Image (cartoon, rainbow, N blue to C red):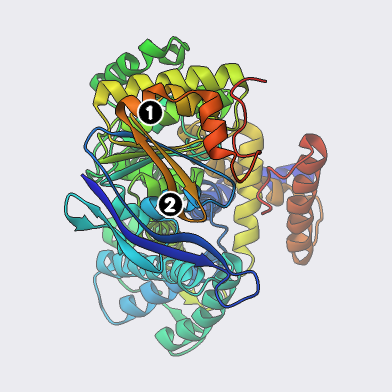
Amino acid sequence: MQILLGFWNLVPITLVQGLIYSFVALGVMIPFRIVNIPDITAEGAFPLGGSVAAILLVQGIHPLIATALAVAAGFCAGAATALFHLKFRIHSLLAGVLVVTMLWSINLRIMGKPNVATFGLNDIFTWISDAIAQNLTLQILFFGVLLAVVLLLLWWMLHTEVGLALRGIGANAQLAPALGVNYLRYAVAGLGLANAITAFAGALSAQLQGYGDVSMGFGLLVNGLASVILGEAIIGRRTITAQLLAPVIGCLVYYQLTSLALSLGLAPSDLKLVTGLFVLGTIGWTLAGRGRARALAT
Amino acid sequence: MIAIEHLSLRFHRGTPDERVALDDLSFGIAEREFLVVIGTNGAGKTTLLNAVAGSIVPERGRIMVDGVDIVPMPVHRRARFVARVFQDPMVGTAPALTIEENLAFASRRGVGRKFKLALTAQARSAFRDLLVPFELGLENRLQAAAGTLSGGQRQVLALVMATIQQPKILLLDEHTAALDPRTADIVMQATTRLVAEHRLTTLMVTHNMRHALDCGSRLLMMNAGRIKLDLAGVEKSKLTAPELVRRFGEEDEQILLPGEV
């Protein structure tokens, strides 16, 4: 009873966490499911967003501009991965590993040190209302609305002529060029968009917790994958609406589940092992169930 | 007007496996001509089609479309001139997209894409009208994923997609070869319908003798990267299967597969 009460008390703050990381789950889903190029750049794009936002806030830049530049930096990171993958003909996962590794140094260069505090500075939350920083309900509302706006924009974009072509390169890479689609350009834009969203989450996260940190993205990619898998198991991915909602629902459920597991006595240090086993288990189960790889494995 | 000029290509150049695929090949395709290309495996017919489509770059030669050489253009840029139906029904459509999304996707070939909703009520009703004549019921399944269609249905959809924007030349790459004979005939009927309706300039590669005889306004027989026989008009329409086999079979008996099994 005591344990469950502990979990219950954590539900709101876990919800805030889940909402922020929903952006990351979206940023992980897009390359895997829409563009059909497996990408791990999220792991570096998240701290990149946090680093850029934090250092710009310290320099007195307006929080909106700081956040926008963090998003732009994330776009560049994703675009770089796509370019390395397609121009140098290396596997997209290796291209992502290279970009993430290089981003570690770049993030340190950006901040000049491993972390930069933004306490007391004018950030995006104080810009909107001082109340948000203290009030979990307002935070849930804020991130919920923001997430809804991003989801609506993505839904609209994926139904435009351009969005259809983006889904087209993922659905049939051989057909798309024959229909006049520049594969390279769309792949770069697709991975750029995905990592821009992830960097957006990094920028928001840094401003909410009051510091940017070079190691703040560690393990986020696997959490994102777990969220996508979980969400798709819950609502499927038959339509674009379901495909967009799956990472969000999966992410919200995933963070509540981990919170529950921690309340039940799981050591926080074991969380990554458990999450990794969950992803492996789901892929293995899917393989066994359908006889062929339909999971995120490529 | 399409002009193939001195097109040459060797595979495995500089190795013991070196093989001539296209040997200084030159010919013209008139406006609205329906050209059928036959030949043995390795005769160069698919290489010729790939060269026009842009998936293979020739060593020498030009491919002129209305006076412009398209050889230097990447596939996505020549899509403005060239539409293609692939042999593999899996390749010609995007399986994860619905029928109407596939059509909307294809309808922007060569005209560019904007941040504008791809599917409107008007577009849907136009797509329905395009599909009705084929009597496959596709018009009632616009929201079904293309991946749920049979091979023949997919090839018909691929044909409609290739012709939804008028191309300068339509390339048909043995597009009935992966189908059973009855379905192949249905797809071939759909092909002649669309070609006649849109008055398309067409280049079709086929192994199907009956289709080669019955369809098209001109017949090219290729061998070792060169044209061995070029028949048009009355000559082509008077051509019979035994005659074709005789003229063809001088070197190889296994050139053409019979149209029926």
> Mark 1: which secondary structure?
helix
Left or right of A180 on screen, residue B184: right
Few, some or many residues within 10 Å of mark 1 (<14, 14–19, 20+): some
Q: Is residue A95 above or below residue A251?
A: below
Give the residue at x 55% y 44%. Answer: A247
Residue extending farthest to the left is B67
Judge by depth and name the residue closer to the eye, B141 or A97. B141
Q: Position of residue A198 (x, y in %)?
A: 46, 60
> Mark 2: which secondary structure?
helix
Q: Position of residue B254 (x, y in %)?
A: 66, 39
Left or right of B247 on screen, residue A61: left
Few, some or many residues within 10 Å of mark 2 (<14, 14–19, 20+): many
Left or right of B112 on screen, residue A184: right
Which residue position holds label 1?
Answer: B236
Give the residue at x 45% y 59%. Answer: B22
Chain at numbered mark 1 = B
Q: CA distance from mark 2 to mark 1?
A: 21 Å
Give the residue at x 41% y 69%. Answer: B59
Check disc 2 and give the amino acid type.
Answer: Leu
Residue B48 numbered tag: 2
- Looking at the rendered image, the disc whose residue lies closer to the viewer, 2 or 1, is 1
Residue A238: name its quadrant: top right
Check disc 1 and give the amino acid type.
Answer: Lys
Left or right of A61 on screen, residue B228: right
Q: Is residue B226 above or below residue B90?
A: below
Q: Could you tell me which quadrant the C terminus of chain A lies in?
A: bottom right
